[in-house]
Amino acid sequence: MKTLRIISVFATVFFLLNACNDETQTDLQKPEIILDIADAFPQNCDTLYFGETFTFKALFTDNFELGADNAFSINIHNNFDHHSHSTEVTECVLEAVKDAANPFSFIESYSIPEGTRDYETAITIDLTEGDSNGVFDDGDYHFFISLTDKEGWSVQKGLSIKILHR
């Protein structure tokens, strides 16, 4: 009887210790797109120029892990109709509504190395002056950033920018 009691106590302690040692954690937070680091670019209401290149610079963070294929994307498209998906508080001065003849468009996805919690971008983007249809329309554009962490949480940031010809 005493042996059975000792075995029961050890078995109970063993099961309790293993039940409490569960280190599996669940990611319940979205990643972050941080644009207030030094040299972050572009910012809301910035002006860019056709025929020039610029470097997209931002900091991405996550409490668990960012790394994945197609972890973030950049979408630059016209805002000639004044639609909105800006996530910024500051409102920019917009030009008059106009029809697009040959608008610039840029859509690209990028990967982040696995195991990464903080990632600073340094993506060079070329704003060509035009394409086979002619010179690109200048005016109001959106710079839209989408970031997805390894768990699948997603966050977006929409900036209003101008792209002009010098």
Image (cartoon, grey):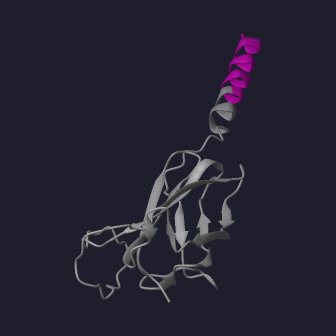
Task: Please say if 95 is above or below 122.
Answer: below
The residue drawn where x is 59% and y is 47% is 150
Nearest to the observer: residue 47 or residue 58? 47
The residue drawn where x is 51% and y is 82% is 48
Task: Please say if 103 is above or below 166.
Answer: above
Locate the N terminus by quadrant. Answer: top right
Instruction: Pinpoint residue 49: horizontal percent, then vertical percent.
Output: 52, 83
Q: Is residue 46 magenta?
A: no
Q: In this picture, which residue range is highlighted in magenta?
A: 1-14
On screen, residue 127 versus residue 85, left or right, reads right
Instruction: Pinpoint residue 98: horizontal percent, then vertical percent.
Output: 24, 75
On screen, residue 59 versus residue 97, left or right, reads right
Instruction: Pinpoint residue 24: horizontal percent, then vertical percent.
Output: 62, 40
Number of marks present in the image shown: 0
Q: Is residue 10 magenta?
A: yes
Task: Please say if 70 is above or below 166.
Answer: above
Nearest to the observer: residue 32 or residue 48? 48
Q: Among all residues in the image, which is located at the extreme right?
A: 3
The residue drawn where x is 63% and y is 84% is 39
Residue 23 occupies which quadrant of the picture?
top right
Q: Main secondary structure of the magenta part?
A: helix
